[in-house]
Image: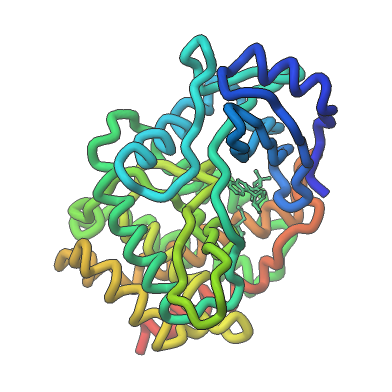
Amino acid sequence: MAVYTQLNLEETTDWFKKQFELGELVSLKGISSGIENSNFFLSALQKNLQTEYVLTIFERLSATELPYYLELMQHLSQHGIKVPAPFLNKDHALVLSLKDKPAALVSKLEGASVMQPSPEHCHEVGFMLAKMHLAGLSFDKHQPNLRSLPWWQVTIPQILPFIDTEQQNLLSNELKVQIEFFGSDTYKDLPQGPSHCDLFRDNVLFKSLSKDAKPELSGFFDFYFAGTDKWLFDICVTVNDWCIDHATGMFKPDLISAFLHAYQEVRPFTDEEEMAWPFMQRAAALRFWISRLWDFYLPREAALLTPHDPKHFERILRLRIKQHAN
Ligand SMILES: Nc1ncnc2c1ncn2[C@@H]1O[C@H](COP(=O)(O)OP(=O)(O)OP(=O)(O)O)[C@@H](O)[C@H]1O
Ligand SMILES: N[C@@H](CCO)C(=O)O
């Protein structure tokens, strides 16, 4: 369950009518998946046409933090990228207020997440990610990835007391490697721009078509870890979830090759990106090992009902280090 703030149809109908000229609300349904926010599917009838929306009530992000994410989604959707489009209210605001909490209304994407992707799925994701990176170049707001090196540096000391000596050494040594990598000329010359930074399989929807049909991507969502970062970091985060055998953490050759081929059809890698690839693989694994350890040992109030398994990214990090050494 993840509906922390309860809504009923009557109060939401009143609120919807005051905020938008999108017709009459006819249904409201809480969404049980997700752990950060309260999400609802809404359906409204306007001139005999029924349209569906997603209403999010933000439980942790404040109203001042939201414009970057919502304006980025607005920008991307206006530039042909498949992401939920946020709606402006009658006062031209994207950040709304409901039950004294910040809220947003966005378009509903069709379909479902694909948890066992084929090369065709990885192709679609790689292609859209490259298009998203290029479309983000004209977005004029800037916010760093708030889960990058400075966050690792403050978070690692909080985690160290909970893990064993071997894990402590791994974490501390990898942090040193990454500090050096982030300080290198190669790193500084990597192309960058707005990045999703959390494009796991559960943050992408595909249209539910017949089994034999070519998969059709419906969109990327959950941009609330987005920020300006090196595009290669975004790519590494994405392939570390989409293109691996989840039991071993090894890349599946057909999946990674489909992803990278599609990405580079749109935007070929620079020489610096080729050079930085093994270091960035490690950085992407480290990022999620740290956040999962943090969520596991230091859970915050009203968050993370079932923390993700930190071991998974420890395994991936060890593997990427080993592959780099070979
Ligand atoms: N724009 C959208 N279109 C269709 N479905 C959506 C959309 N946004 C969210 N959903 C659905 O709502 C569910 C919960 O959303 P989400 O994963 O963003 O939850 P959250 O609590 O906001 O964030 P987190 O994933 O970090 O827990 C998703 O799994 C998806 O099924
Ligand atoms: N994708 C993250 C969860 C935060 O959205 C993880 O799997 O650790």
Q: Where's ligand 2: which quadrant?
A: bottom right
Q: Which of the two residues, 99 or 177, is positioned nearer the viewer here?
A: 99
Q: Position of residue 61 (x, y in %)?
A: 62, 31
- The image shows residue 251, relative to residue 68, as above or below, that is below
Apparent side of residue 314 relative to residue 75 in the rendered image (left or right): right
User: Which quadrant is home to the C terminus?
Assistant: bottom left
Q: Position of residue 284 (x, y in %)?
A: 46, 63
Q: Which of the two residues, 129 or 323, is positioned nearer the viewer here?
A: 129
Apparent side of residue 81 relative to residue 26 in the rendered image (left or right): left
Apparent side of residue 23 relative to residue 240 in the rendered image (left or right): right
Q: Position of residue 203 (x, y in %)?
A: 56, 56
Name which residue lies at 78% across and 50% down.
32
Name which residue lies at 27% across and 45% down.
135
Name which residue lies at 39% across and 68% down.
124
Name which residue lies at 50% across and 67% down.
285
Q: Which of the two residues, 41 or 164, is positioned nearer the viewer here?
A: 41
Colour approach in the figure: rainbow
Q: Residue furthest front?
A: 48
- Total residue callouts: 0
Q: Is residue 57 visible?
A: yes
Q: Is residue 289 visible?
A: no
Q: Quadrant of residue 58?
A: top right
- The image shows residue 237, relative to residue 299, as above or below, that is below
